[in-house]
Image: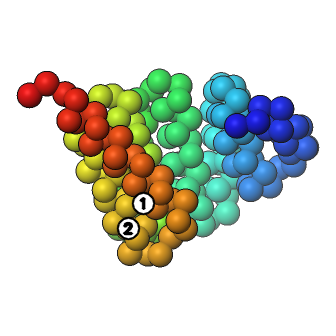
Amino acid sequence: MDLRAAGERLDELEALRSLSAITEKVALLRMLGRLDEAWDMANAAVRQARFTGDRETLLACRIRRAQVQQYQGKLDIALQDLGGCVDEARAHEWYALEAFALQHRGKVHFDRGDYRLALSDFEDAYTLRTREGLPSDQLESSALAIDVAKERIAAQPA
């Protein structure tokens, strides 16, 4: 990641208050390691999404907020939030968001050392992404995560 370009883009977005600008700020701040700011911005995105009344958009913002929690090391809270997001996406048949939440819940399981649970989530995300014809970069991300989780499982003592 080009840190200077990310910082410059963040400067460009500074005065913007649209939900898309706020969610981009969350991602940039998270990538730059400015996690407290990312958390504040993620909460602002959730609040703004609530005002729109679009539950699908709100769910996407909640998933992004849980990503920040993961990066903050708040794995138990992130896992709980992402579990709720997976359930909500599944109930509403929002398959792309379900796959997104599964992928990130798998990452939290992975960070906790729960490689089998991570593998299950990565495989479920891959299946959904394949079935729904989602972009190849998302499929590749899931496939790579599956491979890494399998390697970790194989390396564990019996």
Q: Can residue 87 be seen in the rendering of this structure?
A: no
Residue under the point 50% across and 70% down? 134
- Image check: 118 left or right of 44? left
Left or right: where 112 falls relative to 64: left
Q: Position of residue 100 (x, y in %)?
A: 47, 56
Q: Is 105 drawn above or below residue 3 in the view shown?
A: below
Q: Nearer the viewer, residue 52 or 83?
A: 83
What's the residue at 47%, 57% (across, down)? 140
**Residue, x 52% and y 39% (percent of image)?**
67
Q: Position of residue 98 (x, y in %)?
A: 42, 61
Disc 2: which residue = 128
Question: Label 2 is placed on what type of residue?
Answer: Leu
Q: Disc 1 marks which residue?
A: 99
Quick one: 106 or 1, which is closer to the camera?
1
Rate crowding at label 2 as few (under 14), some (14 to 19) or many (20 or more) other CA atoms within 10 Å: many
Q: Which image quadrant: the N terminus?
A: top right
CB contact under 8 Å: marks 2 and 1: yes
